[in-house]
């Protein structure tokens, strides 16, 4: 009886249902990652410098974390924040770069739907944690320069640990809804991404049911504004206050010394937020931007900060540099001859 009703139904409606079912891909269909458009022939060789940068990020950040953990003298808020930043960079690079290298060396473009959701969540949540830690480091520099006599009472080790917990919870809570918001959407069979890894806005733009995107757009904008946007504004305010305090110092020598303590942190802030802002602008004007520029900017956003962190902070910070070199000498002396 049901089959007869279906067979006698309007042919246009039947065709429309058939078209819809065929046009929507399976929910578990993989996404297609993008390498470096226009440079596909050079993917194999371009992977080597990226691999070298990844090794530098792994080794450098691991050394920073281990040195800070092993040295009781470095258990101060400034170094604890630095260790947290190195740990976040270590995980952030590890959840993206192996997949990028697999794409460039093995031409492994397909990434499973669930894996893409997990990678997207890790990238956004870890970026939120890094933003929070950079803000905490800016506050640390502000207190050290503007209120040096109150530094030991305002910023204690327990406060630093609480800030680390807040960074963890903040990154998880704000970006945990993103995978669930994406799972509501229906994606077309062809799912080519613009980057070598999965991002919320890139995945969202591949949805076929555009009428459901409003919630994703609004929540994504709220999460970015309340985490990265708010942190960036507070960092700017802290540096304006630091600049005001530095200009009040009597001699140029004192001004240079005070400014030098902020230089490494300022480099890390620029290395994190400039690619982030650039990538947001590129997503806004995606169709008018070169695909190669999109791919390069996205790789800079995720790889450059983890590489610069141990170089800028580890190499410039005398305590970390001296202890790292001492451990290397001890390990060499212990090697059997």
Image (cartoon, rainbow, N blue to C red):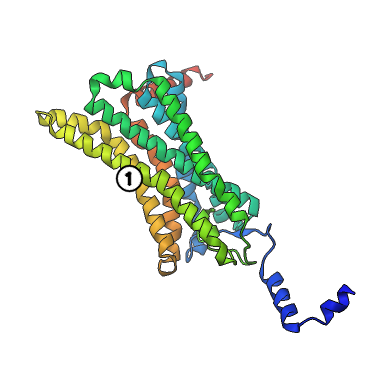
316 vs 224, left or right, is left
Q: Nearer the viewer, residue 185 or 73?
A: 185
Quadrant location of the N terminus in the rendered image? bottom right
Residue 133 on image: x %, y %: 40, 35
**Residue 80 image-quadrant placement:** top left
Q: Is 7 placed above or below 64 here? A: below
**Residue 192 image-quadrant placement:** bottom right
Query: Quick check: can you spot residue 92?
Result: no
Residue 285 on image: x %, y %: 40, 65
Task: Find disc 1 in the rendering and name its residue.
Answer: 270
Q: Nearer the viewer, residue 223 or 130?
A: 223
Residue 263 on image: x %, y %: 27, 36
| Residue at image point 36% right, 33% down | 136
Residue 204 on image: x %, y %: 54, 59
Crowdedness of circle 1 by 10 Å Cα count: few (<14), some, many (20+)? few
Which residue appears farthest toward the left when viewing the image?
250
**Residue 56 image-quadrant placement:** top left
184 vs 255, left or right, is right
| Residue at image point 40% right, 23% down | 159
116 vs 322, left or right, is right
């Amino acid at each position: 009886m049901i089959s007869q009703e279906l067979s006698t139904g309007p042919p246009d409606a039947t065709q429309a249902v058939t078209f819809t079912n065929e046009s929507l891909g399976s929910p578990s269909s993989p996404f297609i990652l993008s390498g470096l458009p226009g440079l596909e022939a050079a993917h194999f060789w371009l992977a080597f410098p990226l691999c070298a940068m990844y090794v530098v990020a792994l080794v450098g950040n691991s050394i920073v974390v281990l040195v800070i953990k092993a040295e009781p003298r470095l258990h101060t808020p400034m170094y604890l924040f630095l260790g947290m930043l190195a740990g976040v960079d270590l995980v952030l690079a590890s959840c993206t770069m192996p997949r990028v290298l697999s794409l460039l060396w093995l031409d492994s473009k397909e990434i499973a739907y669930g894996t893409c959701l997990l990678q997207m969540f890790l990238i956004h949540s870890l970026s939120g944690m890094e933003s929070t830690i950079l803000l905490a480091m800016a506050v640390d520099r502000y207190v050290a320069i503007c209120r040096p006599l109150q530094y030991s009472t305002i910023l204690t080790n327990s406060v630093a640990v609480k800030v680390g917990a807040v960074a963890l919870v903040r990154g998880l809570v704000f970006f945990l809804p993103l995978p669930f918001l994406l799972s509501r959407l229906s994606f077309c069979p062809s799912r080519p991404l613009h980057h070598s890894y999965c991002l919320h806005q890139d995945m969202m733009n591949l949805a076929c049911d555009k009428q459901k995107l409003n919630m994703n757009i609004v929540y994504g904008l709220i999460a970015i504004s309340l985490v990265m946007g708010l942190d960036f504004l507070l960092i700017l305010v802290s540096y304006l206050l630091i600049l005001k305090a530095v200009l009040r110092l009597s001699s140029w020598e004192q001004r240079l010394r005070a400014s030098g303590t902020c230089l490494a942190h300022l480099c890390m802030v620029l290395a994190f937020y400039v690619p982030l802002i650039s990538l947001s602008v590129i997503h806004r004007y995606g169709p008018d931007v070169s695909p190669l520029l999109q791919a390069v900017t996205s790789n800079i956003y995720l790889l450059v900060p983890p590489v610069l962190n141990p170089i800028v902070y580890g190499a410039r910070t005398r305590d970390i540099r001296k202890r790292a070199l001492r451990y290397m000498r001890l390990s060499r002396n212990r090697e059997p001859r």
